[in-house]
Image: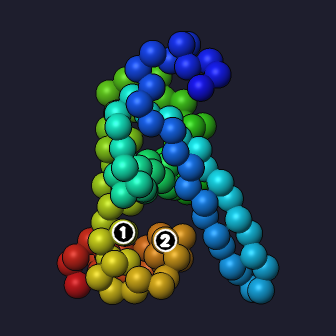
């Protein structure tokens, strides 16, 4: 492999093709991976899905909660707010999976802002 000496611990190169169809339009994406661990196809897919889950959470934290623009000076406040945001996302996700799997997370979060009864339901108090 060209350049292989530059990555002496390289054990795996993989590619995953995603195929999306939405409103009659087909989109394909390729994602490429390198790893220092020997992975079969199933293992590579498992690790890729775990990474996508992490990226989805980071996207939600940034887009829905504006985490990247949060400029608290005190480190403990930053950590506490991060924990609170993740707790809120996890509670909303549990509610979504249990009660309304097809409802977008943004709708569940908006409903919590607009209706205290809905917020109590998400918190498991109803």
Report whether 9 appears left or right of 25: left
- Answer yes or no: is residue 65 visible: no
Q: Nearer the viewer, residue 103 or 23?
A: 23
- Disc 2, SS: helix
- Disc 1, SS: helix
Q: Quadrant of the C terminus?
A: bottom left
Badge 2 density bin: few <14, some 14–19, many ≥20, Cα 10 Å: some
Whichever of callouts 2 and 1 sits on the residue coming sooner in the sequence is 1
Residue under pointer 2: 105
List the single residue furthest toward the left: 125
Q: Position of residue 114 (x, y in %)?
A: 50, 76
Establish if 16 lies above or below 22.
above
Q: Position of residue 48 (x, y in %)?
A: 45, 51
Q: Position of residue 41 (x, y in %)?
A: 41, 54
Q: Nearer the viewer, residue 40 or 120?
A: 40
Establish if 39 lies above or below 110.
above
Establish if 90 lies above or below 66.
below
Q: Are marks 2 and 1 in contact (CB under 8 Å)?
A: yes
As measured in the structure, the alpha-carbon distance from the residue carrying label 2 to the one carrying label 1 is 7 Å
Q: Position of residue 107 (x, y in %)?
A: 53, 76
Residue under pointer 1: 93
């Amino acid at each position: 492999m060209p350049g292989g000496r530059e990555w002496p611990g390289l054990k795996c190169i993989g590619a995953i093709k995603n195929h999306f169809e939405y409103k009659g339009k087909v989109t394909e994406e390729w994602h490429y991976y390198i790893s220092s661990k020997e992975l079969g196809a199933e293992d590579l897919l498992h690790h890729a899905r775990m990474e996508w889950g992490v990226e989805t959470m980071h996207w939600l934290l940034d887009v829905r909660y504006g985490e990247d623009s949060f400029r608290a000076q005190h480190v403990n406040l930053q950590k506490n707010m991060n924990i609170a945001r993740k707790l809120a996302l996890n509670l909303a996700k549990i509610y979504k999976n249990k009660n309304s799997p097809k409802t977008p997370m943004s709708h569940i979060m908006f409903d919590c802002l607009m209706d205290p009864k809905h917020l109590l339901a998400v918190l498991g108090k109803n």
